[in-house]
Amino acid sequence: MKLDRKEILKALETITIAGEGKNMVESGAVKNVLTFGDEVVVDLVISTPAMHIKKRAEDDIKKLIHEQFSPEINVKVNIKVETPENPNQIKGKAIPGISNIIAVASGKGGVGKSTVTANLAVTLAKMGFKVGVLDADIYGPSMPIMFDVETEKPISIEVDGKSKMKPIESYEIKLLSIGFFTSPSQAVIWRGPMAAKALNQMIFDAAWGELDFMLIDLPPGTGDIHLSIMQSLPVTGAVVVSTPQAVALADAKKGVAMFMSDAINVPVLGIIENMAYFTPEELPNNKYYIFGKEGAKNLSEDLQVPFLGEVPLVQSIREAGDYGRPAALQTASPLEKTFEEIARNVVEEVVKRNDNLPPTEAIKITTMAGCSAVKK
């Protein structure tokens, strides 16, 4: 049968892309329709990189053409993502004075991502680096508790004639969190644009000063906050935290896939295994693999990303977080050595990552703890 381009366009007017009010022709998403015998090619441009949105749009187009014209038609859909400027999104620009931005993520909640972030931060500071932490977990901020600054409130200071928010400082870490602006019992009920706007202010309207590392404690999963930050900030790399448990590993795998996708394209510095094993105090030579053995380590090998280290299941880590003094601050303790090894591995991967960038994009970090500097 002979396919008419105008008829196909008219048929496509009945399809709406998820999240948009207009049909895909009226909204301008359909850029071109070509017909070649029994083949139809549809060029589509959408504003979201979400995989399920792209897949749904492709399936809707194929289903429509097969039903209205012929199931024998070979339909090819080319989808390109172009994110429009949005005043509620975090603007894509570097933060003056901040050398490296590391996103700490987890596929699911409850794996200890925030605990790892806090301990990694204080360990980097002990190694001599200047460190800041942005608590981007808008709906469940925990950094104020972990750094014992729940009652603190950021003040406004003037920097170069502009009013800026001064981060709270604790254990030599500069810290900002939505938890400083809400009461502990108050639920944050915000849509994505409101959350992005709040993060925008904490990032660009704050006096962070000179930092070697900014750690961003992301919410669990792969949602709006991740997309806003990953697409807008010059993130150096991502660290994914998981337990050895199969259900956690499945979600961690999705987290790694998100960072490595074409739409995000953020290097994965590695995976950290938390709650790797339990050693009773009365049996110091015994290890009990409660959640499984070396699951995250095996996942890192399967995905060909570095394994940054393992953290045991120790009661004092939980207690230290609850009391607002990260466990890595315990001098001459096994936990201090554990987080030191992980921090060194993270810095090493950052150095490797920066060494492989073109000279004009290379990011400078301080030479410290046996790590070489990366020069512009």
Image (cartoon, rainbow, N blue to C red):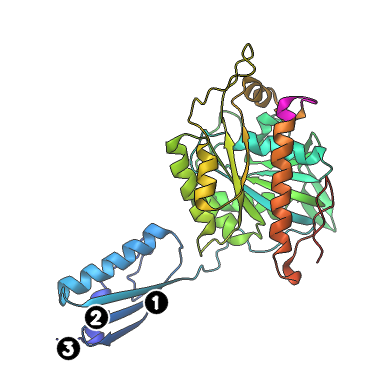
The residue under label 2 is which amino acid type?
A: Ile
Q: Residue at x 74, y 43 (%)?
A: 344
Please tell me the numbered disc located at residue 244: none
Q: Is residue 362 magenta?
A: no
Tags 1 and 2 in contact by the CB under 8 Å rule?
Answer: no
The answer to whether residue 267 is left or right of residue 191 is right
Question: Which residue lies under the disc numbered 1?
Answer: 28
Looking at numbered disc 3 in the image, what kind of residue is underneath it? Lys
Per the rendered image, the range of residues in magenta is 330-336
One can see residue 17 in this view:
yes
Residue 295 % position (x, y): 50, 38
Quick check: 304 left or right of 254? right
Q: Give the SS element for disc 3.
A: loop
Q: Give the numbered dot on residue 2.
A: 3
- Name the element at disc 1: loop
Q: Is residue 331 above or below residue 202?
A: above
The numbered dot on residue 8 is: 2
How packed mark 2 is, by other alpha carbons closer than 10 Å (few <14, some 14-19, many 20 or more), is: many
- x and y, in percent, of residue 197 in the image: 59, 53
Tell me the quarter of the image containing the C terminus.
Answer: bottom right
What is the secondary structure assignment of the residue under circle 2? helix
